[in-house]
Image (tube, rainbow, N blue to C red):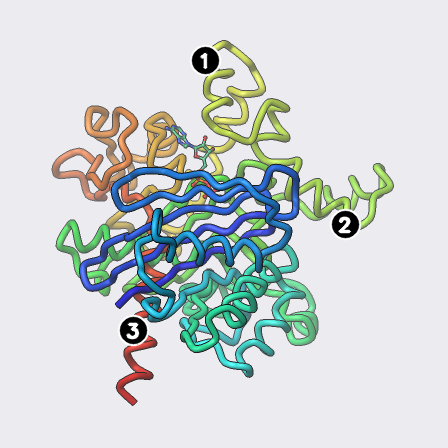
Amino acid sequence: MKILVINCGSSSIKYQLYALDNKHILAKGVVEKIGMKGSFLKHEKETGQKVLFEGEILDHKIGIEYILGVLSSVKHGCISSLDEINAVGHRVVHGGEKFSESVLITDDIMESLLKFIELAPLHNPPNLKGIYALQLLIPDVPQVAVFDTAFHHTIPKHAFMYAIPYALYKKYGIRRYGFHGTSHKYVSNRACEILGLDPLKTKIISCHLGNGASACAIKNGQSIDTSMGFTPVEGLIMGTRSGDIDMGAVAYIMDKEKIGTKSASTLFNKHSGLLGITGISSDSREIRDAAEKGDERAILALKMFDYRIKKYIGSYAAAMGGLDLLVFTGGIGENSDATRYGVCEDLEFLGIELDQDLNKGIKMEERIISKAGAKVKIMVVPTNEELMIAVDTQNIVNKITKN
Ligand code: ADP
């Protein structure tokens, strides 16, 4: 079965075409700078050979046309006709309280998804644009929505509620939803698979550390808490997002700077985090370089980043009544031995003991990095949200073809 996985952002579309019979990627790529000058499609064939197409990609529909065109082209493609695509799986950021698992997209489902635009105004609209474009271009192909929020549906009410007037939860759905669910689910299951552990009997903390970052407490195979909340701005310190902050400080800043909600949202989502503290970059590599040259704010930002993760690990170990497995993923989690060291330092009392040699070096591969015999196993597991989306899509399509 061939499954096209689509991840639409505001100005980009990432895609992968899977032959799922052998978990094989036939082609992948990205359309970038949609609606801007210099838009392009970067396509990578199975052989690793890359091709670049520049053009006026004015909107998501044109972007999808480019993708379908290159996938089925004689020279660069990997399918002889679009009929070979059996299904499309879409990453959809917000599924609200309604969707606890992936769903086949129907007209009713589209109506529900439209309602969640209010909850995720930055993320859901481009996701929907991708769905509309594919419905138009290959109308007979089933499409599936896979939600970032779905894995966190098991978080109990005492953990997902905010202590605000209950009426606001009922009226507007103000609660913790959590994001990165597909990634937390994938890396926690994969780590258990590698270690031969039963996920249903394992207490896991997974740390997805990329430009966006979140931690998740997974007990007996279920997410029981996560650091992102009503929106992806809460929790850990991120590339440009503040993470946890006293709302009293938010109100004070808005008052003093005379800014409204829109500017405040931009301030805490786009100008804060590592970028805000350092004034250098949101990219942890550039900050690490500056720190090595003695830049004090870069040193501070990295310490704050690690410290915040450490606090979440402590609180989640308490929430689960113990810890068996700690997993690092995402661009920073997979690559930065220094971050993993900074996070794990002084956590021996919890049974977290990093093996310095195993931890060392930049290699994006699955591996155990804890000391032999340590109580808590520590692993690096590169995330693979696309594979999860493809597998969920296949399972749903198989179900409908059987019925
Ligand atoms: P996104 O959340 O956008 O998917 P990624 O998971 O790609 O982001 O993570 C981006 C982050 O990963 C950046 O801060 C980048 O500096 C960091 N990163 C990528 N490669 C390395 C590396 N080799 N060493 C340290 N950090 C890295």
Instruction: Identify the residue position indicated by label 1 in the image.
Output: 292
Q: Amino acid at mark 1?
A: Glu
> Which residue does the numbered mark 3 point to in the structure image?
395
Q: Residue furthest front?
A: 74
Local SS, label 2: helix
Residue closest to the far top? 293
Residue depicted at 53% across the width and 79% down the height? 109
The residue sitting at 65% across, 76% down in the picture is 170
Mark 2 sits on what residue? 262
Between marks 3 and 2, how big is the CA–CA gap? Answer: 40 Å
Q: Name which of mark 3 and mark 2 comes first in the sequence.
A: 2
Q: Which quadrant of the rendered structure holds the N terminus?
A: bottom left
Distance between the alpha carbons at the discs numbered 2 and 1: 36 Å
The disc, 1 or 3, on the residue closer to the chain's N-terminal end is: 1
Question: Foreground residue, 341 or 162?
Answer: 341
For marks 1 and 3, give the CA distance: 48 Å
Badge 1 residue CB within 8 Å of ligand 1:
no
